[in-house]
Image (tube, grey):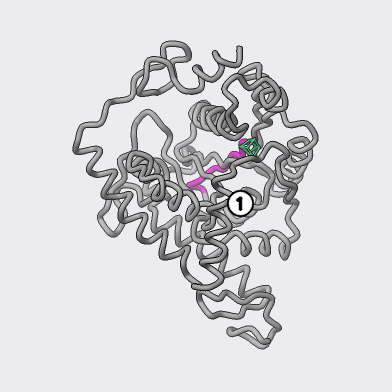
């Protein structure tokens, strides 16, 4: 089958758009979607000087999503005086698995010539995920601990590195899964905070909608969220990027796995399902976020232990660390 844009052979077919694309046109279409998302979400600063660019911290795990995002951002903004990129990687204390993916991160950032910082749970919390799964007092999933620790490290280090934006490599499948899980659980609060934390445009976006950025957190963005997971993987392969594709040995989000299968089947039978889930979800989540703000949701205050932002006396991370201790 030929590419719909030129005479080259197609390397992929996107059922949701009907397009067959060759390597070059496919890669360009991924890059275009990322740049459009950056524009639509109003991520680019209006006023900066070459002496004082915006700092964008990119969460870089070494998996395909964050590797592709970092590559496209570096290609797009490498020579742009408005933006300075810093890659931030986290070692959770998962022997073997994370060591290999950090190698991929080092190779990529050296190739792209961007600053790379590595933080470990061991140094930050005196905790290693390999030990947490053995001694878990709550019998929770490893990811429930790991996700809380990761969010804490990302937002604290984004602050420390002087980040104006914190960008992560969530793809369309990740976002549609989270949307469906929040919806099926009837979790309106989660929908509202998902919107406030990372969906929707920043203030000043063309459609006039705004996002309630809490001053307690560095504003977030997910520029890869219009690109399906398979296309991210294909892009990484075609561009020969050093992505680490092994699954974490502690991955155990069973419910997310069920949602993944459900979405896969829906997308196979009804191409475009993920896009329409996200379009509807953003509307709903935006309304939920506006309503929550109108209701005067409790303000963030400082955690009694670590001083981080929380709506409780002691933040979730400190509670989990107490239980592990
Ligand atoms: Fe952490 Fe779970 Fe991701 Fe493994 S799969 S790195 S335990 S969040």
Residue 231 against residue 216 in the figure, above or below: below
Q: Residue at x 49, y 31 (%)?
A: 155
Specify the quadrant that holds the N terminus: bottom right
Q: Residue at x 49, y 43 (%)?
A: 50
Q: Is residue 88 magenta?
A: yes
User: Label 1 crowding class (10 Å Cα cut-off): few <14, some 14-19, many 20+?
Assistant: many
Of 197 and 28, which appears nearest the observer? 197
Can you see residue 161?
A: no
Q: Residue at x 41, y 32 (%)?
A: 217
Can you see residue 175?
A: yes
Lateral position of residue 180 relative to residue 290, left or right = right
Q: Secondary structure at mark 1?
A: helix
Instruction: Name the residue carrying label 1.
Output: 74
Q: In the image, residue 184 lies at what x, y percent?
A: 41, 50
Q: In the image, residue 94 lies at what x, y percent?
A: 73, 31
Of 54 and 17, which appears nearest the observer? 17
């Amino acid at each position: 089958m030929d590419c719909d844009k030129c005479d080259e052979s197609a390397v992929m077919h996107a059922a949701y758009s009907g397009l067959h694309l060759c390597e070059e046109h496919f890669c360009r279409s991924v890059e275009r979607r990322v740049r459009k998302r950056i524009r639509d979400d109003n991520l680019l600063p209006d006023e900066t000087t070459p002496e004082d660019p915006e700092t964008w911290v990119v969460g870089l795990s070494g998996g395909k999503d964050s590797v592709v995002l970092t590559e496209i951002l570096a290609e797009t903004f490498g020579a742009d005086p408005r933006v300075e990129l810093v890659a931030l990687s986290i070692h959770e204390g998962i022997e073997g698995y994370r060591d290999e993916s950090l190698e991929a991160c080092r190779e990529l950032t050296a190739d792209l010539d961007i600053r790379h910082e590595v933080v470990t749970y061991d140094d930050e919390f005196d905790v290693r995920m390999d030990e947490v799964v053995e001694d878990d007092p709550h019998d929770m999933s490893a990811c429930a601990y790991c996700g809380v620790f990761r969010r804490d490290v990302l937002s604290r280090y984004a602050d420390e590195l002087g980040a104006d934006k914190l960008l992560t490599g969530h793809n369309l499948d990740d976002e549609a899964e989270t949307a469906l899980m929040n919806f099926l659980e009837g979790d309106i609060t989660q929908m509202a905070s998902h919107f406030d934390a990372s969906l929707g445009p920043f203030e000043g976006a063309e459609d006039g909608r705004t996002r309630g950025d809490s001053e307690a957190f560095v504003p977030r963005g997910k520029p890869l969220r219009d690109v399906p997971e398979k296309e991210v993987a294909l892009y990484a392969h075609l561009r020969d990027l050093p992505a680490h594709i092994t699954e974490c040995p502690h991955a155990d989000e069973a419910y997310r796995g069920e949602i993944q299968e459900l979405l896969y089947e829906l997308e196979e039978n009804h191409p475009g399902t993920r896009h329409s889930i996200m379009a509807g979800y953003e509307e709903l989540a935006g309304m939920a976020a506006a309503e929550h703000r109108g209701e005067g949701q409790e303000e963030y205050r400082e955690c009694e232990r670590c001083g981080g932002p929380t709506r409780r006396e002691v933040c979730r991370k400190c509670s989990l660390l107490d239980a592990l201790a």
